[in-house]
Image (tube, coloured by chain):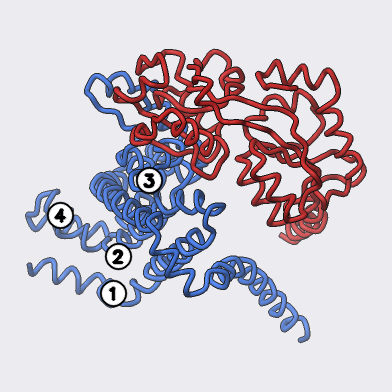
Amino acid sequence: MRRLVVVVGALLVVGLPHLAQARPAASPRLTILAASSLTEVFPRIDRRAAYSFAGSNQLALQLEQGAPADLFASASPTFTQRLYRKRLVEKPRTFASNALVLAVPQSNPAGLGSVFDLRGRNVKLVIGTAAVPIGAYTRKVLQKLGLTDVLSKVVSEEPDVKSIVGKLALGEADAGFVYRTDVRAAGGRLKAIRIPARGQPEVRYEIAVVRSSRHGAAARGWIRTLTRTARARLLLRRAGFIVK
Amino acid sequence: MTARPAFTALLVLALAVAIAFLLLPIVAIFSQVGLRGLVDGLRSDVARDAFRVTLKTNVFSMALILGVGTPAAYFLATRRFPGHALVVTILELPLVLPPAVAGIGLLAAFGRMGLLGGELETLGISVGFTQAAVVMAITFVASPFYVRQAIAAFEAVDATMLDASRTLGAGPARTFWRVALPLAGRGLGAGAVLAFARGLGEFGATIMFAGSLQGVTQTVSLAIYQEFDVNLDTALAISAVLVVASGGLLLAVKVLPLWTGSRSTSPSLFARSAST
């Protein structure tokens, strides 16, 4: 019993400070908070960094609450600019664009051929919440195409784009608005239905160095790698992003 | 002589640390929300819809859990058979299972592409994204809290009571209704309250299996998650109500036995059930 107490005590003393530390001090491994839609491509560009992928709105909130990080990559300038105004991040830079598609499970259970088919049929549609970029873009698309009435077909509002992909890949929902890069990343599980150009919103990705970062120089270097090296640009393009 | 107060001090210190750690987040919720925030937050449509959905789905879940769980627990408490421990383990499994696993399991079983998806589809039933899916998720996750307690409660019933009931001419069903059920009542009530409290807070399995749509499948936990970056006041207000509700339920479990304590002595109860 006494030995157990000693072991537990030692574990606490040694372990707690370790758990509380965001990253080992010796290696400047960058912590990157990035939009869900970057889940596949960022680790391909840099395998060493520590990533946290979620809805850009959630990541912005985490940073506002003081989450330790070096870089923040958002699927919409809304959130990088908000943090920039609050002086929480350095000046954001655009590094890619994306486009929305209507994704359906490979088997296409509702037999959809175009976005306008959403109107007539009994379709289970999944979209993002209004707060997350994919959800805000989706509402823009529907507005531009005069399809806002299909919002009544929505069966679930998801917190980030990958949750939409999951519901579609499982075949649980009939259709969902996601980025075209998500369909590519899902392999053969999803099919993309194009959205007419006049319905496309501008989907711009921005990245910024977090001001409280202890590795500011390394983080700025990371952005340079992302925006300037041929390899990173090729990987982004291959994933379906639009890089100028 | 000096060792004993020092030891007591150590115990008190440990308790104080535990209390402070557990209480601080709860106090923080109330200090952040304020009275006005609480009222405004609860007046929002999101909060109102979420409470309505939560109450409705939990009532259905509790009916299922009590209706099926009580006889099942009675059977397990009164009979021994090979594999008994295994059966109990299966019933208790959701207790230790991560809710996300429960969610993916429910999808794999009852989802459209799931094990029973084809059969359900031909019957014209599609549970995904409906309140039925929320009820299933809650039932799956909360049921062991009741069943476990119910088995223990039935096991604690003096077997000679059941035997006496039988020798006095009551059939097994009558014995269950008139003797076992009243005698185990307190334990069953405690289990039901715990299961209900767990069901109120269900999150992981629900968001995976049922999705989240205001007024349909968005329960209070899902509403908190959705609102925390949109309208923090609403999220805090809902959280505050949940703290009060859950705390109240837990306290009820502890206090209820004290009120009814005197009835638990078996002779009087035996006399009563024999006289009716």
Amino acid carrying label 3: it is Ile
Q: Chain of mark 4?
A: B
Query: Which one is in front in this view, the residue at disc 2 or the one at disc 3?
Result: 3
Q: Circle 2 — which element?
A: helix
Amino acid carrying label 1: it is Thr
Residues flagged by tags 4 and 3 on a common chain = yes
Chain identity for the colour red used in the image: A
Which class describes the residues within 10 Å of circle 1: few (<14), some (14-19), or many (20+)?
few
Q: Position of residue A160 (x, y in %)?
A: 55, 37
Q: Circle 3 — which element?
A: helix
Q: Position of residue B94 (x, y in %)?
A: 45, 42
Q: Circle 1 — which element?
A: loop
Of the image marks 4 and 3, the number of the one nearer the N terminus: 3
In the image: residue B120, left or right of residue B144: left
Q: Chain of mark 2?
A: B
Q: Badge 4 is on which residue?
A: B175
